[in-house]
Amino acid sequence: MLVAFSVTPLGVGDSVGDLVAEAVRVVRASGLPNRTDAMFTTIEGEWDEVMAVVKQAVDAVAAHAPRVSVSLKADVRPGVTDALTSKVEHIERALQE
């Protein structure tokens, strides 16, 4: 499955980048395929392992913020692997036509 999520610390002022980086650090340390862009971090793996990483990322931010907002979108597709890169590659190929 793919899970795209964002974690936003609330009640810590205008600059939240350092706390968001803590969430991304957890994702990268997980060893699961992942990608971070300006809006979301996407992780690929099995349901239980991906959701455990999301929880750890939220917990890392919650340790420094009184409130945390989480947005999550999931693509559950059993038997599919490498969707994190293959979906993008498909689009890039289509753009070359």
Image (cartoon, rainbow, N blue to C red):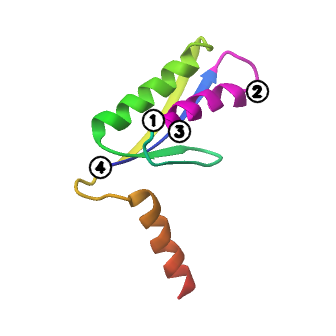
Quarter of the figure with residue 73 = top left
> Where residue 36 sits: x, y (%)?
58, 46
Q: Distance between the residues labelled 1 and 3?
A: 5 Å
Secondary structure beneath disc 2?
loop
Asked if the residues shown at circle 1 and circle 3 are in contact, with their CB atoms under 8 angstroms apart, the answer is yes
Q: Distance between the residues labelled 1 and 2?
A: 25 Å
- Which SS type dominates the magenta stretch? helix
Secondary structure beneath disc 1?
loop
Circle 2: residue type: Ser
Dot in front, 2 or 3: 3
On screen, 40 above or below 71? Answer: below
Q: Which one is earlier in the sequence, the residue at label 1 or at label 4?
A: 1
Q: Which residue is drawn at 59% across and 11% down?
A: 66
Magenta-highlighted residues: 10-29
Dot in front, 3 or 4: 3
Secondary structure beneath disc 3?
helix
Residue that label 4 marks = 76
Would residue 30 appear left or right of 41 to someone viewing this image? left
Q: Distance between the residues labelled 3 and 4?
A: 21 Å
Dot in front, 1 or 2: 1
Furthest residue in direction bottom, as rendered: 97
Residue that label 2 marks = 15
Dot in front, 1 or 4: 1
Quarter of the figure with residue 80 = bottom left
Residue that label 3 marks = 28
> Where residue 79 sits: x, y (%)?
23, 57
Circle 4: residue type: Val
Q: Which one is earlier in the sequence, the residue at label 1 or at label 2?
A: 2
> Where residue 3 sits: x, y (%)?
41, 44
Q: Which mark is residue 30?
A: 1
Circle 3: residue type: Arg
